[in-house]
Amino acid sequence: MFHVKQDYMSFKIIAIDGPTGVGKSTIARQLAEKLNYLYVDTGAMFRCLAWSWKNTGCPEDEQSLQDLGDQTQIVFKQDRVFCNNVDVTAEIRSESISISASQVSRFPLIRQVMKQQQRKLVSEVHSSGNIEGAVLEGRDIGTVVFPAANFKFFVDASPEIRAKRRLLQLQERGEKTNYEEILAALIKRDEQDKNRKVAPLRAAEDAIIVDTGKLNASEVLEYLLGCILR
């Protein structure tokens, strides 16, 4: 077991979990900037893996999945994301990659590989002594990856609200889609994430539940900061 509070002492871990389309990445990034902590975009890591998985024909046998996990190189440089030396910043945010990320993440071997990579990344930053904490967002950060995190939040909103937000995001990027398709995809992914056998989407027992349905990003950030700094 990975004991954050014992192993890291003054190094703080903040876990932000929740379903797709709820704004976890934006919240986590802003929170990390405010606290001067490391921001780990685990969603982008899974999306990179999904991008690589699609490019290799979506294999499902164990050896191919192990090779995929071992050989996929993910690098964050400022606000860009590189997968196997290719800038995939925009591509991994497409709706098709979102669907593939949900599909590839259902494999236990893939989740184990990603958990190890996420822990390794945080461990390396902690060892450097340059940063006092890390903010990670995902679907199982507070329940599986860092179950002893100092702070755990579960952000949520109705599928309808999330679908409207997602529609606006895709329209801003010039993607052609519609509300009904996005809503159906969100509901389907919620079911997949909640019912998978390994690391299902759920709030940790000691997580603080945050309903973002009636809050904007600034209000959510203010609330989280208040919980952490009080």
Image (tube, rainbow, N blue to C red):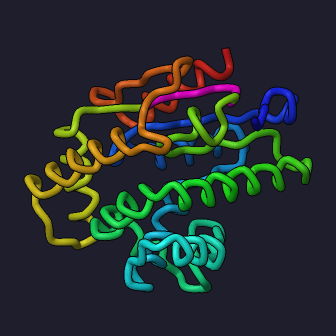
The residue located at (61%, 85%) in the rendering is 85
Quarter the N terminus occupies: top right
Q: Is there any visible trace of residue 63 in the rendered image?
A: yes
Q: Position of residue 72 (x, y in %)?
A: 60, 76
Label the magenta part by its dominant secondary structure. strand
Residue situated furthest top in the rendering: 230
Q: Would you say 100 lies left or right of 207 here?
A: left
The residue located at (50%, 61%) in the rendering is 46
Q: Is residue 71 above or below residue 153?
A: below
Count up the numbered dots: 0
Q: Is residue 90 above or below residue 159?
A: below
Pick whichever, 193 or 131, lies toward us: 193
151 is within the stretch colored magenta: yes
The residue located at (20%, 55%) in the rendering is 167
Q: Quadrant of residue 144?
A: top right
Q: Which residues are magenta?
A: 149-154
Q: Position of residue 129 (x, y in %)?
A: 91, 48
Quarter the C terminus occupies: top right
89 is within the stretch colored magenta: no
The residue located at (36%, 57%) in the rendering is 102
Q: Would you say 149 lies left or right of 174 here?
A: right
Pick whichever, 132 or 35, lies toward us: 132
Q: Position of residue 101 (x, y in %)?
A: 40, 62
Q: Is there any visible trace of residue 81 in the rendered image?
A: no
Q: Quadrant of residue 3?
A: top right
